[in-house]
Image: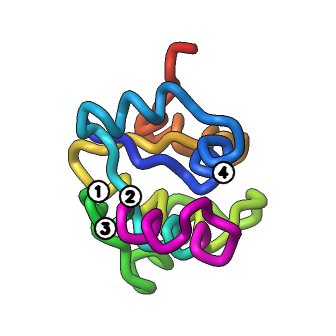
């Protein structure tokens, strides 16, 4: 099992640390997604150059294509739920992955991830 940490989890990690994320990194249970790295790359990252290089070390979930994401939204009636395109592309990517869960603090995204039985909820 791998866990894809959403952008908001990484923001918490960079701001104040996050022991669960640290453990996932240490035990090689962490995956990433190009959209998460893209969202993070427009912010102020600590040790920016090294952090961006470090992201390349994590396995990446295959991004859903535009067409796959669009079909995913339509087939599952995920429109009008207050979710953004990036959220739904990440969700579609994780759903298509056979061994990955999604960890997010976004309540709307977490609720939909639970519906698909792919939500990661750490034991704090």
| Outermost top residue | 124
Q: Determine which of the numbered discs, if any, sits on residue 102 in the image.
A: none
Q: Quadrant of the N terminus?
A: top left
Residue appearing at x 76%, y 64% in the figure: 80
Q: Earlier in the sequence, mark 4 or mark 3?
A: 4
Task: Please tell me whether mark 2 or mark 3 is closer to you in this view.
Answer: 3
Element carrying mark 2: loop
Choose top left, top right, bottom left or bottom right for residue 32: bottom left
Task: Please tell me whether mark 2 or mark 4 is closer to you in this view.
Answer: 4
Q: Earlier in the sequence, mark 2 or mark 4?
A: 4
Task: Please tell me whether mark 1 or mark 2 is closer to you in this view.
Answer: 1
Q: Earlier in the sequence, mark 2 or mark 3?
A: 2
Q: Determine which of the numbered discs, if any, sits on residue 11 in the image.
A: 4
Q: Is residue 48 magenta?
A: yes
Do callouts 1 and 3 mark residues in contact (Cβ within 8 Å)?
Answer: yes
Q: Determine which of the numbered discs, if any, sits on residue 56 in the image.
A: 3
Choose top left, top right, bottom left or bottom right for residue 99: top left
Q: Which residue is mark 1?
A: 58
Residue appearing at x 51%, y 14% in the figure: 123
Q: Which residue is mark 2?
A: 32
**Taking the image as drawn, is residue 122 in sight?**
yes
Residue 36 coordinates in the image, percent (x, y): 52, 65
- Residue nearer the viewer, 1 or 92: 1
Element carrying mark 3: loop
Q: Earlier in the sequence, mark 1 or mark 4?
A: 4
What is the magenta range?
39-54
Main secondary structure of the magenta stretch: helix
């Amino acid at each position: 099992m791998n866990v894809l940490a959403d952008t908001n989890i990484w923001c918490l990690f960079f701001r104040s640390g996050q022991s669960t994320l640290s453990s996932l990194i240490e035990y090689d249970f962490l995956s990433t997604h190009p959209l998460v790295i893209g969202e993070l790359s427009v912010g102020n990252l600590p040790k920016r150059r090294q952090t961006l290089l470090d992201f390349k070390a994590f396995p990446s979930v295959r991004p859903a294509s535009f067409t796959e994401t669009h079909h995913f939204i339509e087939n599952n009636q995920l429109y009008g739920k207050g979710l953004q395109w990036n959220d739904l592309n990440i969700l579609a990517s994780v759903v298509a992955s056979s061994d990955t869960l999604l960890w997010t603090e976004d309540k709307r995204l977490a609720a939909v991830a639970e519906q698909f039985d792919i939500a990661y909820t750490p034991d704090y």
